[in-house]
Image (cartoon, rainbow, N blue to C red):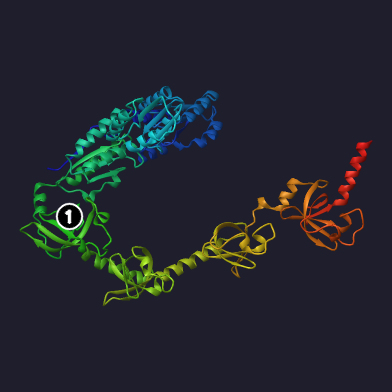
Amino acid sequence: MAEVTVASLAGFCFGVNRAVNTVKAAIDGTSRVYTLGKLIHNPSFLMSLADKGVKVISADELDAIFDAASEQNPTVICTRAHGITRELSERLDDYSRRNSSFKVADCTCPYVKKIHDIVKRETSEDTLLSVLGDENHPEVMGIVSWSGGDYVVANNADELVSLAGSATKNYNTLILVAQTTQNLKEWEKTQKIFKKLYTNSKIFDTICSVTENRQNEVLKLSRKMDMMIIIGGKDSSNTAKLFSVAKENLDLTFLIEDASSIPLKYVKPHMKVGIAAGASTPGEIIQEVQNIMSENIEKTFEEMVEESLKPINNGDRVTGIVTSVSDNEIHVDIGAKFTGIITYSELTDDPSVKLSDLYKPGDEIEAVVVKVNDAEGVAQLSKKKVDVAKNWQAVVDAHANGDVLDAKIIEIVKGGVIGLCGGVRVFIPASQSGLPKDADLHELQGQTKKVKIIDINEQRKRVVASIRVVEREESKARKEAFWAQVEPGQQYHGEVKSLTSYGAFVDLGGVDGMVHTSELSWKRIKHPSEVVNVGDMIDVVVKDVDKEAKRISLTYKSPDEDPWKLFTEKYSEGDTAHVKIVSLMDFGAFAEVVPGADGLIHVSQISREKLDKPSDVLKVGDEIDAKITKIDPETHKISLSVKALLDDLDRAAADDEQ
């Protein structure tokens, strides 16, 4: 007999109901109402609040909202049922004290508040707080923020015990709490281990009693049903736990957010269906799901008998539900007095695939009846016979339209490889494999590659495909997209592909740019290999682009390392610098002031005595002190003088004698 059973504890819990009513009361038509984060995990309910003007905000928006709050613009901030962090709580308290038009409605669930109080009271620098829960869940983030000491968080007992045990500090007490919606079995396991390993632990049972009762009810209900429907938001922790509990007992368990996603294709007229819902699911959604499920399983006894006695014949196309999966075959409920069986060879041509990776109980499958055994009540089915016509037509259409298909490489053969395109075997010649000539084709084994059909023989059902064509087209498209958007000043992270005497070529993503030797370093270098090597990944900036000639000039020099910038930050006109002679000319000597920035000491400024040439008193490599007599910021020229420095020293000595 068909039936639909709704869990007695389905829908809003006390905490969620309290939060919902608080927000509804705040909507008075005069105040701007905001929720700090999603009030509850239910998309349809949140949309209904949005329709009434309630806006979901983040903590980053609070300052602006606080500044805008006034007598003419009163504001109410509602915290979420999961609670908020201590920092946010104190921040909101401060705002509400400073501005009477900025009000805060605390919608935190009392059960969550209780955990905050426990953590605040029991933790200190000498304790380790251990939380069984999801560290990224808002509730858990709020809980740990109230800790006065260190804490660890994990979603399962073994990991939590490991984290607590690996703590290097010796703690006087270990405090153990759980997220209110935590799985009961995992919580019981955690308590048992902590009691055994940590005699100094204090355990607080913080799982919401409603959550505990819901999970127990779903556990019992799922053992009696043919199908379970769990209603709730996909981000909801308590809904996920209900789904997990039911799924352990019943493969045919589905998680839906509302009536629009009911899996009706799995519903049979003889089914017993159980319905449960998370704490954030409104009653009207539960009722709608119940009504739709009831309508779809209410068939007369005569209809059920007629369906069960419906004959099947060889060649019939049937649709059924997978009931079990083994290594060699799957069993299918085809809605008749026969059990459908599909062997491995009638499911796939790919020898590397596990059937459990392709199918699971509850999946819908279409097949053709191959052989009926009335005596045993078994029907041999073939999925491949259904797929053949469908998949072949898809390949023919792809060839006609020039579409790209996915091909899984399943076999290496003489002259190329065999790929599967939706069940159709295609030959890919070595020359079309996308690999270099004489490369080992075995490296493609098991890979899924994009291909285009380049030849097809419909009579003989033979297909030739190409990986190379797709890769060329993709490369061309990437290059066109690159040239369309590249501009001077853009930064790229690319690989050094080759070096020449005059620079390095860098792959910017299918297009090469060149870094001239002068743009590789602020220092003088003779060859690019002094700075980079082939294979290096470097950051470069586009200096110039010639889109017609398809040329890109790059620079590897960092502005922060600009020698002129370093020089001007360190020196001014009149300063004394310790310099190094780097070259000698007839008219003077060039000296390095900072690496990459040279100054000129004119021959007349090297000595008080007249010199024929600088080499009379200097040689390359000498280090001397010189005065900076002039800086030209436009031409980046620096004038130095040893003679002026000597004059300064003489004047200073004369002043000291006086």
Tally the numbered discs: 1
Q: Nearer the viewer, residue 188 or 642?
A: 642
Q: Residue furthest right?
A: 658
Identified at 6% across, 59% down, the residue is 374
Residue behind mark 1: 332
Q: Which of 586 and 82 is in front in this view?
A: 586
Quadrant of the image occupied by residue 599: bottom right
The quadrant the N terminus occupies is top left
Q: Please tell me whether residue 527 is drawn above or below residue 332 in the rendered image.
A: below
Q: Please tell me whether residue 82 is drawn above or below residue 253 in the rendered image.
A: above
The spot of residue 643 in percent (x, y) is 88, 51
> Is residue 652 rendered to the left or right of residue 346?
right
Provide the secondary structure element on which disc 1 rests: strand
The spot of residue 265 in percent (x, y) is 23, 51
> Is residue 228 rendered to the left or right of residue 301?
right
The answer, for residue 284, to whether it is visible in the render is yes
Q: Please tell me whether residue 157 is drawn above or below residue 503 in the rendered image.
A: above
The quadrant the C terminus occupies is top right
Label 1 sits on what residue type? Val
Q: Please tell me whether residue 8 is drawn above or below residue 606 in the rendered image.
A: above
Quadrant of the image occupied by residue 610: bottom right
